[in-house]
Amino acid sequence: MFAVSNLLLGVARVIELALWAYFFIIIARALLSWVSPDPYNPIVRFLYRVTEPVLRPIRDRLPLMTIGIDFSPMIVIVAIYFLDAFLVQTLRDLAFSLR
């Protein structure tokens, strides 16, 4: 059973790493929205390509606000924190209970 436990711990760590990497990508994207970056820069294009499939549906579902603030990155960050606290911790607890 220890092999399954170690597998679940490994999966939990990989998910946690992916969530934190995406967290920093979302932060970088939000910071880029404050300036006028070159749209042909490869880093800017990468950030838009990686974040837009997640941010666009959230942005479409938010009520229109005329103040010009995009709250979709904040919603994604809250979702990342929730997944880290719920999913990763659940996998860890399950792995430790199998030992």
Image: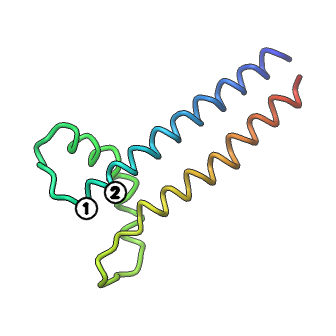
> In what element is the residue under mark 1?
loop
- For badge 1, the amino acid type reads Trp
Residue occupied by mark 1 = 34
Where, quadrant-wise, is the N terminus in this rendering?
top right
Q: Quadrant of residue 33?
A: bottom left
- Is 6 situated left or right of 38 in this image? right
Front residue (pair 67, 72) = 67
Front residue (pair 52, 89) = 89
- For badge 2, the amino acid type reads Ala
**Mark number for residue 18?**
none
Q: Is residue 55 above or below residue 44?
A: below
Q: Is residue 26 above or below residue 65?
A: above
Where residue 37 appears, as percent x and y from the top left, is 15, 52
Q: CA distance from mark 2 to mark 1?
A: 7 Å
Q: How many marks?
A: 2
**Mark number for residue 30?**
2
> Within 10 angstroms of label 1, few (less than 14), some, or many (20 or more) residues?
few
Residue at point 79%, 22% (across, down):
5
Where residue 50 appears, as percent x and y from the top left, is 33, 44
Where residue 60 appears, as percent x and y from the top left, is 36, 70
> In what element is the residue under mark 2?
helix
Where residue 71 appears, as percent x and y from the top left, is 41, 69
| Residue, far bottom | 66
- Is 92 situated left or right of 11 in this image? right
Residue at point 48%, 57% (across, down):
76
Residue at point 72%, 27% (across, down):
8
Residue at point 89%, 22% (across, down):
99
CB of mark 2 within 8 Å of CB of mark 1? yes
